[in-house]
Image: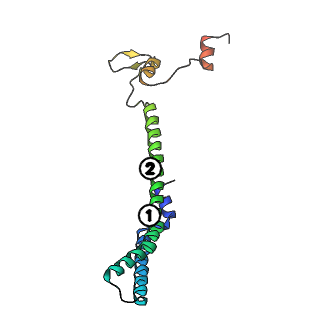
Amino acid sequence: MSIEHTSSKNRFASPVFLLIITLISIFISEILVMLFIAKLPAMSHYYEAVLDGIILTVILYPSLFFFVFKPIKTNLELRIKAESELNKTIEELKKSLDEIKVLHGILPFCAACKKIRNDKGYWDKIENYLLEHSEIQFNHGMCPECRKKYYKEF
């Protein structure tokens, strides 16, 4: 599951949506404060501030929780999960790369006996060279042509 795929499914976590919900919540709470103040007899600024705080607490904070913080938390959890999966895949790939041993370059070998010249300039059997420079294991056998050539009775 990629990060882009999971975040695109969660449309509530887009910054524009979160901003709109926050502004609407503040606007509605302020309208309610104005309506309550208009219905009530004259009161001090202290009571207006308390009423404003209560309405903000009742409307703004729950809407922020459900429309802002909860989607952000969900998105963060999905990102953390995707990152842990990505780190696991990276570790598996590193482990696989450590197991791969590649021969590269030019191998000088004799056209007649097929021996390979090593780094020190000595000629060695191809089996010895490959055993030393790779993790290959050999199982010797004989092809049908050589069997006829060396063992005529078969």
Percent coordinates x, y for residue 89 in the rendering: 47, 43
Q: Quadrant of the C terminus?
A: top right
Identify residue type, mark 2: Glu
- Helix, strand or loop at label 2? It is helix
Label 2 vs 1, first from the N-terminus: 1
Residue 58's place in the image compared with 138, above or below, is below
Depth check: 109 or 12 in front?
12
Is 60 above or below relative to 1?
Answer: below
Q: How is the image coloured?
A: rainbow
The residue under the point 39% across, 78% down is: 51
Q: Considering depth in this image, is 16 or 94 the residue closer to the camera? A: 16
The picture places residue 48, in percent across and down from the top left corner, at 35, 81
User: Which element type, helix, strand or loop, lies under badge 1?
Assistant: helix
Who's the residue at 62% across and 15% down the image?
147
Residue 145 placed where, x, y %? Answer: 61, 19
The disc at residue 69 is 1
Q: Nearer the viewer, residue 11 or 143?
A: 11
Res 15 quadrant in image: bottom left
Q: Disc number at residue 83?
A: 2
Q: Is residue 116 visible?
A: yes
User: Badge 2 local density, few (<14 within 10 Å), some, or many (20+)?
Assistant: some
Q: Are marks 2 and 1 in contact (CB under 8 Å)?
A: no
Q: For label 1, count other residues whose C-alpha is less than 10 Å away and answer few (under 14), some (14-19) or many (20+).
A: some
* Amino acid at circle 1: Phe
Q: Name the residue: 48% across, 47% down.
A: 85
